Amino acid sequence: MSLTPRAPCGTLRVEQAGQSVDVYGWVHRRRDLGGLIFIDLRDRSGIVQVKFDPVHAQAHATAGELRPESVIRVHGPVVKRPAGTENKELATGAVEIDADAVDILNRAQPPPFNVNEDGVVDEQLRLRYRYLDLRRQRMARNLQLRHRMAKAIRDFLDDEGFVEIETPVLIRSTPEGARDYLVPSRLKAGHVYALAQSPQLYKQLLMVAGMDRYFQIVRCYRDEDQRADRQPEFTQLDLEMSFVAEDDVLDVVERCFAHVWKQVLGAVVPTPIRRITHADAILRYGVDKPDLRYGLEIQELSSIFAGTEFKIFRQALDAGGVVRGLRIPKAIGGKEIDALTEAARGDGAKGLAFWHREAEAWRSPITKFFNERELAALEQVTQAQPGEVVVAVADRAEVAAAALGSVRKLAARSLGLINEGTFEFVWVTEFPLFERSKETGGVTAAHHPFTAPRPEDVPLLASEPMRVRARAYDLVLNGTELGSGSIRIHDPEMQQRVFSGLGMAPEDAERRFGFLLDAFRYGAPPHGGFAYGLDRVVMLAAGEETIREVIAFPKNQQAEEVMTDAPAPVDAKQLRELGLELVRPPVKQGR
């Protein structure tokens, strides 16, 4: 049988009633009413109902053999459904196909889980049979949403004068941040490529080349531990612009998001998007990616307790620490307090102080340690009302911020304070240029070493580098960092100064980044850019919890692709060609 032009299942409407059509797809459901047989036929475009009447004996008999997920072709006229039998849940619900012929193109064995519903299925099983999982309506919608968002991005940037340029995936390893995935070279023995973690250096070189406005929807690779919003390979929107300052880049990104949200989701992104500094975000929300769908701002309480006799607060303040608090606008009990305390301890805090605000006074096991002036000031600063609770952490500033950030997030989630279904964007600006590595304690770049320092902080590079602020910015949506950007360094001398601040000797910088420094010496324009994770953006737009739900063939939390069983062993011949020998770690012996 030759395949003839088909009518997509989900496109049929009343206007086509009376037309004979061929439709192809998968059997979604079958209902046998004793005489009439009904099939819901599904393809990527949607579902249409097909009716098999005994008057068409051969088609009716074949319909009796059909099982879920079998692939079939149906021929027949489009007809209106009888009054009262329409299905308002389907776009095609006003019509059906009166089948006069059907061909079974492929019989399906029973699937390992129900494809015709979006019930809960073990994720490992879903990933093992991902080609079946992607047939489910929710997953198909997610991939189509991803396509529409990518198309809207391309359309917008094309209209803005950007040129899409592909950059290499196999590049020189310049370890910064996450581990590289390394690819041995067969033709240059003993040498390796790295899979690009980002196109950062190439897009800067494109600015030197005069490309002016570049973008790319690009695959990137990072060998790091997996989380709900991480994958070893991921997709990002990457862009760069010449002769710009921060406002120029932020304006383009904001308008791009506004365009995508309107075109794809029919929603409005108010612009300009709110901006807060990194220091302000840490002080008020405890994190550099704040969720602004709820209040719960952290409040500085140190001055209230400057002369306190409460030993825990006194010790923290005398050691140069702080006392910071959070007003929770709901009454909470012991179990909730315990959960919030554990959240605070998870970020290094020794505990969580708390006061219940009652009509006439504060109630807490520690109230007796504070005088009337302190308690009155606590009421004035926090504006706590009867029935509310104030919690506080006394510790180093960074510990108090992180602990209260976690308490804020848990309280909002557990008490139902989050305004679900809304999108709250915020720019976080003026990040530190440098930070201390948690692993080594050494100085490292907070974003990357090609980020320009703020001009007014340049004199601090040699004397107080940890106080230098960067011309960097992150875009955050509902507490998730979408992406980062910055105004770049374009002067070779300034680039060398930043490398030096990172402890990189001039000869080491030339060895690793000489090609970039050489390019700058031939006339590099001022430039800046931005990149955001497309997977994360689609995840949030789709209302999903992990990016695995919006990627066609993702890795699991062990960075394995279970459908094809990757990573997998390779032939010894392949290893010999590369001059490699795989060494397995020793097996730990039981005691």
Image (tube, grey):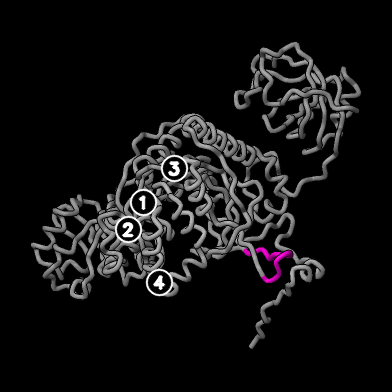
Q: Quadrant of residue 288?
A: bottom left
**Dot 4: element:** loop
Magenta segment range? 182-190
Left or right, residue 362 beside residue 89: left
Q: CA distance from mark 2 to mark 4?
A: 29 Å
Of marks 3 and 2, which one's residue comes earlier in the chain? 3
Q: Which residue, given by chain and number where applicable, does mark 2 sit on?
A: 286
Q: Residues within 10 Å of mark 3 (few under 14, many from 20)?
A: many
Q: Which residue is mark 1?
A: 290
Residue drawn at (20%, 50%) of the image: 385
Instruction: Report which residue position mark 4 lands on.
Output: 503
Instruction: Check if mark 1's residue and mark 3's residue have beta carbons within 8 Å.
Output: no
Instruction: Point out residue 115 in the picture as x, y percentages from the top left corner.
Output: 70, 42
Which quarter of the picture shows residue 411? bottom left
Label 3: which residue? 241
Whole-angstrom CA distance, mark 1 to mark 4, is 32 Å
Q: Name the side, left or right, on which 417 lies relative to 573.
A: left
Q: Nearer the viewer, mark 3 or mark 2?
A: 3
From the viewer's perspective, is the residue at label 1 or at label 4 nearer? 4
The residue type indicated by label 3 comes to Met
- Seen in the image, is 409 located left or right of residue 380? right
Question: Percent from the top left, x then y, of residue 485?
Answer: 42, 50
> Residue drawn 85% across and 19% down?
100
Which of 157/538 is in front? 157
- As shown in the figure, which amino acid type bears the numbered disc 2? Gly
